[in-house]
Amino acid sequence: MSRRQGQAWEARAEAWLKQQGLKPVCRNWQCRAGEIDLIMRDGATVVFVEVRYRKQRTYGSAAESIHPGKQRKLALAASHWLQQHPAEQLRFDVLTLDGPETQPRLEWIQNAFENPLA
């Protein structure tokens, strides 16, 4: 998938999360440790969101692609962001989109994993 396609899916995910009441903070935040697709607020909670799209399940579902190594990488990037933007409450969510581009099945996994660095 191209960078542009990935950004289109992230924009779609962000719009959907806004409909659910979350407030956008940042999209595609990058540091040496990696990238965070979306950073949002759910009340007082900072939410780090990984967006995953899979057209086919040949290599597993979108949710299955968030393995422990990816979780550690996301948590490390989040720790860098938190150094500049302290927050007491945080969580890691995954928003998956599986299936055809015209009608993907969306799944929002809140608290998808605990912070592996904590």
Image (cartoon, rainbow, N blue to C red):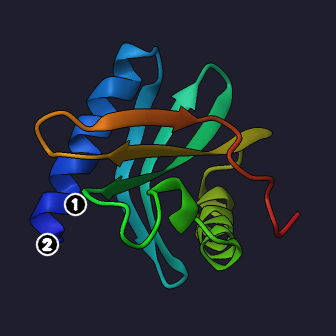
Labels 2 and 1 touching (C-beta < 8 A): yes
Label 2 environment density (alpha carbons within 10 Å; few <14, some 14–19, many ≥20): few
Q: Residue at x 49, y 85 (%)?
A: 32
Where's the C terminus, which quadrant? bottom right
Residue 26 vs residue 118, the one in the foreground: 118
Tell me where residue 8 appears, x and y as whole percent: 15, 49
Q: CA distance from mark 2 to mark 1?
A: 6 Å
On the picture, is 102 further left or further right than 65?
left
Tell me if residue 75 comes above or below residue 44 in the rendering.
Answer: below
The number of callouts visible is: 2
Secondary structure type for disc 2: loop
Task: Give the number of the disc on residue 2.
Answer: 2
- As drawn, the residue found furthest toward the bottom would be 32
Q: Amino acid at mark 1?
A: Gly
Tell me where residue 116 appears, x and y as whole percent: 81, 66
Residue 67 vs residue 15, the one in the foreground: 67
Residue 95 vs residue 11, the one in the foreground: 95
Residue marked by disc 1: 6
Image quadrant where residue 29 sits: bottom left
Where's the N terminus, which quadrant? bottom left
Q: Amino acid at mark 2?
A: Ser
Tell me if residue 86 comes above or below residue 109 in the rendering.
Answer: below
On the picture, is 19 further left or further right than 45?
left
